[in-house]
Amino acid sequence: MADRMQDVLKVIPKVDRILEWPEIVALCSGHDRPEVLAAIRRVLERIRNDVKNGNDATACASGRIVALITAELVNRSTSSLRGVINGTGVVVHTNLGRSPLAKEAEEAILAVASGYSNLEFDLGNGERGTRYDHVEGLICELTGAESALAVNNNAAAVMLALSSLAQDREVIVSRGELVEIGGSFRIPDVMRQSGAKLIEVGTTNRTHIRDFLTAITDATALLLKIHTSNFMIVGFTADASVAEMSALGQGTGIPVMLDAGSGCLIDLSPYGISGEPTVRHYLEAGADVVTFSGDKLLGGPQAGLIAGKRQFIEPMKRHPLLRALRMDKLTLAALEATLRLYRDERRALSAIPTLRMLTMTSEQLKRRAGTIARKLRKYLPDSVTLVTHLGESSAGGGSFPLLLLPTTLIEVRIAGWSPNHIDDALRRAAVPVVGRIHHDRFLLDARTILDRDLPALAASLRQVTTTQQAEEPV
Ligand SMILES: *Cc1c(COP(=O)(O)O)cnc(C)c1O
């Protein structure tokens, strides 16, 4: 085995020889020679590592080396942050940028991106305005709030609200809601950073309104409820509702805040997605302040929205932290455009990709998968087989942790390739494709593949099947 490895390592061509290959000479005419040289070195290094790891089947074929060097050069000339195709079926995929924006939001970004705008300028009287005015009215209109503010993300919204409402004072929270959201956003840590003192009440599985009542002291500044976005406690459980908490808050003069996490502006229960009350519902139930994300269920850009009573939101607008948490003009443009779509619920459901994907029916998805497979088929060599299967997708973004949405999956099989190898190759394609492997199948979910992705998906599938060869015995 070791001998064989040594043999293979010996036949790996040297840099000088590769530089003489006609394909590489051709490459040198389109790229700087040092760039090509560096690419050759990186590829050879990778091949040596592959051989050492035992993947030596076709490691040194010159055709493969040329393909790898070409890919390496392409790689170098593309941005680090780029578009990918989400075949995972997770609609709000935090690692893949959460919500794709509506066309209207994209256009709004373009409209202000490369010119000047009235970001902080009141066109009516020619005086200084504030950036927050562009969305406050819309948030109030869509949630029924008296006052609203939008900042960089929901973590920032929670931080600002706690600093503003409860600095150096006590905040009462149920033990069952001290969540970690991911990316190390942990409620107890955020609370400490904001200068508020956490008072935990109840138990992990059961907290009652009387637990809040008995914890109230002169130092209590806030009753806080947190949406347990990404997990669920099931079985023998109880929690204090927003309505109960606000009745208690009203009786004692203590404000009630809800970190709603995803934050939903329309009732999705007619589409089989139940259990997520709207922000309007929470405010009507008596919450004084509700914070939520812009790029989860809302389907807009990364943002944190704060909606609630004027007396609590106004101080946040003057808080020194706000300057550090403020939203930039491109985000603001996208957020305003997204919120405007919500004025007409039907329009929001069709124009906002996140909502559109979440509310697709299993029938629509079955047809969609069939259409995608048929369209792709035309561009692919015979070694590729596409097979559709019924399956499940998930909402993601910490919303509806247990909800599985029926979908249709497209399995990609390539003769002689393992699912892992397909997965790896597609992730490295010019337009990367991210799928998932389940029961030894490489799968793409029809739900999260956007229409605009189809040409690139076909190209990526073609690219991997024609420029790469099976590297492993399957
Ligand atoms: C997602 C989430 C956050 C963080 O929101 P970002 O917009 O990602 O900063 C905070 N709280 C809850 C309950 C969440 O679900």
Image (spheres, rainbow, N blue to C red):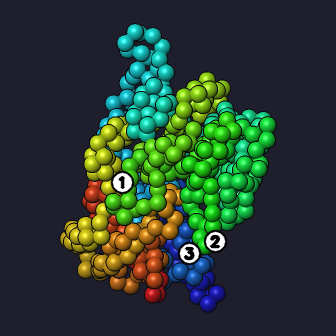
Left or right of 234 in this view: 405: left
Q: Which mark is residue 50?
A: 3
Q: Which residue is tagged 2?
A: 236
Image quarter (top left, top right, bottom left or bottom right) of the N terminus: bottom right
Q: Which residue is mark 1?
A: 355
The disc, 1 or 3, on the residue closer to the chain's N-terminal end is 3
Identify residue type, mark 1.
Answer: Leu
x and y, in percent, of residue 156 in the image: 60, 40
Query: Tag 2's secondary structure?
Result: loop
Mark 3: secondary structure: helix
213 or 370, nearer to the observer: 213
Whole-angstrom CA distance, mark 2 to mark 1, is 33 Å
Q: Quadrant of residue 20?
A: bottom left
Q: Is residue 336 above or below residue 209?
A: above
| Residue displayed at 55% across by 68% down | 46
- Amino acid found under the numbered disc labelled 3: Asp
Residue 438 located left or right of residue 224: left
* Mark 2 neighbour density, 10 Å: few (under 14) some (14–19) many (20 or more): few
Task: Give the Cα distance between marks 3 and 2.
Answer: 53 Å
Pointer 3 local density, CA inside 10 Å: few below 14, some 14–19, many at least 20: some
Sequence-earlier tag: 3 or 2: 3
Per the model, the C-alpha gap separating discs 1 and 3 is 43 Å
Q: Position of residue 307 (x, y in %)?
A: 51, 37
Q: Residue at x 38, y 76 (%)?
A: 391
Question: Where is residue 467 shown, x and y percent of the image?
Answer: 36, 70
Q: Amino acid at mark 2?
A: Phe
Estimate the x, y position of residue 445 in percent, counting from the top left: 36, 69
